[in-house]
Image (cartoon, grey):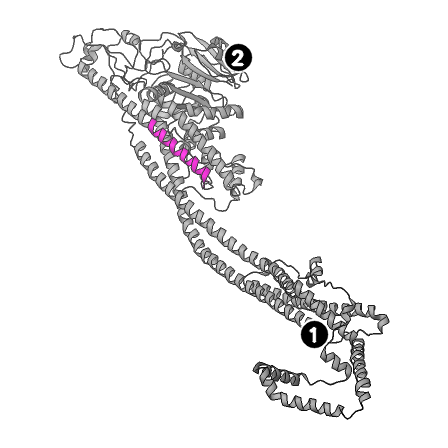
Amino acid sequence: MNGSSDTSQTDSTDVKGGLPGSGNSDSPQSPFSPASASSVSSSPVSASDDITLVANSAGKKVPKVIHYQPQRGTFDETTAVNGDSGSSTFRGVSSLASAATTASSSAAAAAQARVSQLQYNHNRVALDRSINTAAEFVHELRQENKTQPIHYPMTEDPDLDARLNSRDSRIAIMRQKSYSDSPEPTSTSEDSPFQILKIFFRFDPASGDVVGNLDKGALASLIDDKLSQVLRHLSSLKDRIDDTSSKVLVTGDLNSGKSAFCNALLRREVLPEDQEPCTSVFCEIIDALENDGVEEVHAVPIGSKYDIDDHRTFCKFQVSDLGELVYEAKTYSLLVIYVKDSRPPEQSLLRNGVIDIKLIDAPGLNLDSYHTTQLYSRQEEIDLVVFVVNAENHFTLSGREFISSAANDKNLIFVVVNKFDQIKNKDRCRGMIMQQLQPLSPETFKNADEFVHFVSAQNAIKPDGDPKGDPDEPDNNGDGRPDFDRLEASLRNFILEKRSLSKLLPAKTYLCKLYDDIARLAEINEKLYKDSRSAIKAQFDEVSPQYKDNVQNSVKVNEAIMKLIEDSSEKAYDYSRAHIREVIDGVGQAPLGVAFKGYSDISRFAISTQEGVINRILESVAESEDFARNNTSCAIDDIRRIGRQYLDEGSMPATKFVPEAMYSRKRDLFQRRIDTTFSFTDFVDPSLESFCKVCGVKLPSRTISAVIWAAFSKLWKTGLSGLVVMYGPHMFSTMTGIQSMSSLLPQAVTKKVLPWTVMGICIGLPIYYFYKDAPRAYQRKVVKKIKKELENEDYLSVNSLRISKEVRKVLNYPANDVSIGLNALIETSNSKRAKLIREMKKGESCTEFYGELIGRVKQQRNIVESYDLIGVD
């Protein structure tokens, strides 16, 4: 609106005073700059406008204000083109002098603007706090995911066909097949799936159930990546609501007319247009006032971060060079275009006098994967998305995916169906596009009158409207470009007047969805841990008695086996000691079978006799070892039988007992050896028994000798006097008788013959005795020497102990096998028990964590939901 106007056109959507504010200060601002306000003249008020004045206010000098009211009606066709000054009116909006309003209405409007600005700032600060709180929740989830992987239900998108692809699309069929092999895909919720935390898995159709086979580590890594992405988006949200400017992203498929739409908004041809895709670099259009009023292009090289105050971060070009710069995608990542807009603030979108607006023209979605990825990341920094659709192509796959991604925080998206004038069956086209849009952005579909526009951007900058001269739609009311004007008015109204919706609503929407997803994910995990607790408790109740039984059985079996080993060892010891002693005691009595061939062979006889005695003793040791082997074999069978009562056959090693291996070491041979020496004195061993036997005198039997010896011992104890009293007379009479008999012999006999005879007998008889008794005497003497030597070496105890120790040692092997098997059972049950205890403790901790998280998240969700953003505007 240029100059002054004396008329005021009213409408039900009256916006008085000014807009809610720019957000860069706490005080409300006028909707127009001071320069534009000064351009309003104070013409006299006509009589036709008296109805708009307060009583008695006509002719009075009141403060000048501008009353901005969009009105449905006739549109002016003389809008500014390429920097022209334009006409005095624009779309039925006129400026009124101070006589058009009263001082009271102006004050009320200013007060309302202040209240709106204060409420906007309050909501902005509150959303800042909520974003920080949400980031804390996400950090807690990431930490929990590292400690204990989060259970994430494998989802199949129920709206996959509606949201991401068409029914006849081959890609959609392939993606559906990637889920079809999974038995009963689990949804994250009975009502709806995740919105922000949803993870899509895309695999080749022939890959099978890859999703179902993902381990916890791989899934935890995917969840961590998703949470990291959420943190980055929260940071972008915070920067967006703190930024005083508004960024408008114009995007769409290739050749949809994005550049033409931007030119139409600027009312001049700034961006190059072509039938072939020409924009391959992001173009950010900013008012030239930000660049000291100079129109130029700042081309930012790839890898540089743009800073207008640092000339090293960009290269300067003229606006006329854009025709070549937009193709330099390999050199530049961003083209910052500063342009002038000579239109007044009430007409210009860039120079609106309220807030700074950046218009971003993005490359087409299907240009290449790199630019498409860049576009997805850039949309997180955008306040408003204007999606340009080619009316001939409708929503393509890439377009549907982009809108689905943007809908995470942007409930409202401007959809511009361009080139609509080239469609013959417009109703059918409109119906199909609206049908596609409904599942993608329900809120946009509900407010289609304001956010969905069917236009021809190419004709918007031409003063004659449709180049073919075809009439516009029935809602044009006679104007040549009413659809685009209505689009521009809606866009301006949403950005400037409904600033809370365009600037703060995306953050609120994203936070609400994020809180819903976190609460839903926490509820799923809380329920999982609660359900698993009962199952774990049942397993624990089953494993604990098994553990106790295994411990008791192990103690019982070990005691039984130890007793068996001790009994076997003791039995071998007792038998060996008794048997060897018996042989040693009897070896001197029984004949050894060594023939005495005369004194010429006395040496051989002595050696053979000695070897015979020693071998007989060694045989007794070997017999004791054989007994121990047999006893050990039986004990091994008993030990294994005891072990099989509690262990499976496979739990015990298949070891084989080799009896010959026992007592085969050199130490056993050394301890069995008996060393003795040979001497001629060993042939002399006089004894009454042997003497009588040589002389042919028969001695009383052992029983009689024992009785006599007992009687003699008894008498000896009574004393020598008793013996004299009892046997003295008898002995005296015997000696008297002998003396009487000797007196009868001749004296020569008694004095010469008898003494020599007695002396010869006394000498010859011992010699004869020693000669005849020598072989038997040697055997007796050798046995005595060996016995004495064995006693000195403690041979009996050493070998008995050696035999019993070997038995104990051998029996320890099967005993250890049984013990190892029982310990394995104990260890298995104990490890299960300990694992269940850890899982129960971990489950209790996780249940407590998720339960507390659910409460805090829902509380924050209610707080965010309570923010009144609509009432601000």
Q: Is residue 314 visible?
A: no
Circle 1 packing at 10 Å, graded few (<14), some (14-19), many (20+), is some
Q: Position of residue 166 (x, y in %)?
A: 49, 34
The residue nearer to you, when weighing 829 against 422, is 829
Secondary structure found at label 2: helix
Q: Can residue 852 be seen in this view?
A: yes
Quadrant location, the N terminus: top left
Q: Residue furthest left?
A: 56
Q: Position of residue 275 (x, y in %)?
A: 52, 18
Residue at position x 30%, y 17% from top? 25
Instruction: Classify residue 653 by image quadrant.
Output: bottom right
Q: Which amino acid does label 2 sit on?
A: Glu
Direction from residue 221 to residue 66 in the image, left or right: left
Instruction: Please determine whether, in this image, residue 708 is positioned above or below residue 210.
Output: below
Instruction: Please determine whether, in this image, residue 831 is positioned above or below residue 395.
Output: below
Magenta residues, as a range?
128-153
- Give the label, 2 or 1, closer to the camera: 1
Q: Earlier in the sequence, mark 2 or mark 1?
A: 2
Secondary structure found at label 1: helix
Q: Is 139 part of what is drawn in magenta?
A: yes
Q: Mark 1 points at which residue?
A: 586
Quadrant location, the C terminus: top left
- Disc number placed over residue 264 in the picture, else none: none
Q: What residue type is labelled 1?
A: Gly
Instruction: Classify residue 451 by image quadrant.
Output: top left
The residue nearer to you, when weighing 497 against 702, is 702
Q: Mark 2 points at which residue?
A: 324
Q: Where is residue 738 in the image (x, y as percent from the top left)?
A: 72, 90
Q: Residue furthest front?
A: 747
The residue nearer to you, when weighing 704 against 86, is 704
